[in-house]
Amino acid sequence: MKRYAVIFLLLNFFAICSLSAEEQSSENFKKKNFSIILGVGTNELKSSGTNDDSKEETSVFIGVGWEYRFSNKWFSIEPQFYEISKNYKYESTAYTFTDKSSYFEIPVLAKFSYNFKNIPGRVYYAVGPQVSFLFWHSTDFKNGTTTLTEADKTEMEKRLKPISVNGGVVLAVGGVYKKFLIEVRADIVGGDILDYPTFTNKYHYSSGHLTLGYIF
């Protein structure tokens, strides 16, 4: 939750700064932008239950974006497409369970951009829905004080496998200088990501990334 509090404060910071923003030439506001983006961060499986969250694991994504800017210059829509890894790990004295999943994700972001005087770039914040498609998944068990049989492992894999399609929301703040982009983003997968209806708790992914990009 601390991560999202920081992003919320940054959103407000940029909104306040925009009140004193001064528009520059239209060169900083091209009507169409194509970009390549790369993000590195962490992912965690969050639970509605108590003390049932996983450890944070490294998450990486790479993809493309296509931004269309409207005539008012400060507002644009950017669909993106990327491949992202979302891993998590549970550790206990009984056993260690590691889940590795890869998704294709398609967010559609509404972006609000502002320029500052004498700076060849802009800052922005963005928000939008996304849909996730699971295309690869694997699990790994290591026994601790408890020895899991192959039947136990098969049952756990069945219970903990993510569903194939899900949706969520993306929040981001960032800046563009000439053709280079840097951004901090968070995404939360909505609903229950595990395809096992008898679980009492609900589980969803929570991710944060530092994103770098190049705009063509």
Image (tube, rainbow, N blue to C red):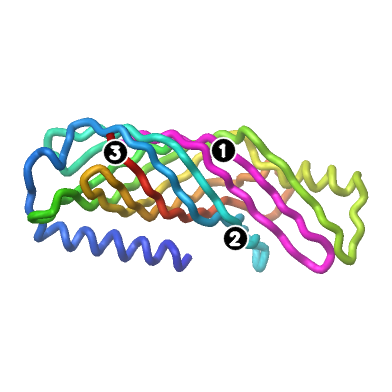
Question: Measuring 38% from the left and 48% from the top, which residue is drawn there?
Answer: 212
**CA gap, disc 2 and disc 1:** 17 Å
Q: Position of residue 157 (x, y in %)?
A: 78, 44
Query: How many C-alpha atoms fall within 10 Å of the one at disc 3: few (<14), some, or many (≥20)?
Result: some
Secondary-structure class at tag 1: strand
Secondary-structure class at tag 2: loop
Circle on res. 103: 1
Identity, as a three-letter code, of the amino acid under mark 1:
Tyr
Horizontal relation, residue 137 to residue 4: left or right: right
Q: Position of residue 69 (x, y in %)?
A: 20, 35
Compared to residue 74, the image places residue 4 above or below, namely below
Question: Measuring 47% from the left and 55% from the top, which residue is drawn there?
Answer: 208
Check if residue 94 falls in the magenta segment. yes
Circle on res. 188: none
Whether residues under marks 2 and 1 lie with C-beta atoms below 8 angstroms apart, the answer is: no
Circle on res. 56: 2
Q: Position of residue 174 (x, y in %)?
A: 30, 53
Identity, as a three-letter code, of the amino acid under mark 2:
Glu
Quarter of the view holding residue 68: top left
Which image quarter is the C terminus in?
Answer: top left
Q: Position of residue 116 (x, y in %)?
A: 12, 55
For the residues carrying marks 3 and 1, which lies nearer the camera in this image? Answer: 3
Query: How many C-alpha atoms fall within 10 Å of the one at disc 2: few (<14), some, or many (≥20)?
Result: some
The magenta segment is 78-106
Circle on res. 215: 3
Question: Measuring 82% from the left and 61% from the top, which residue is drawn there?
Answer: 95
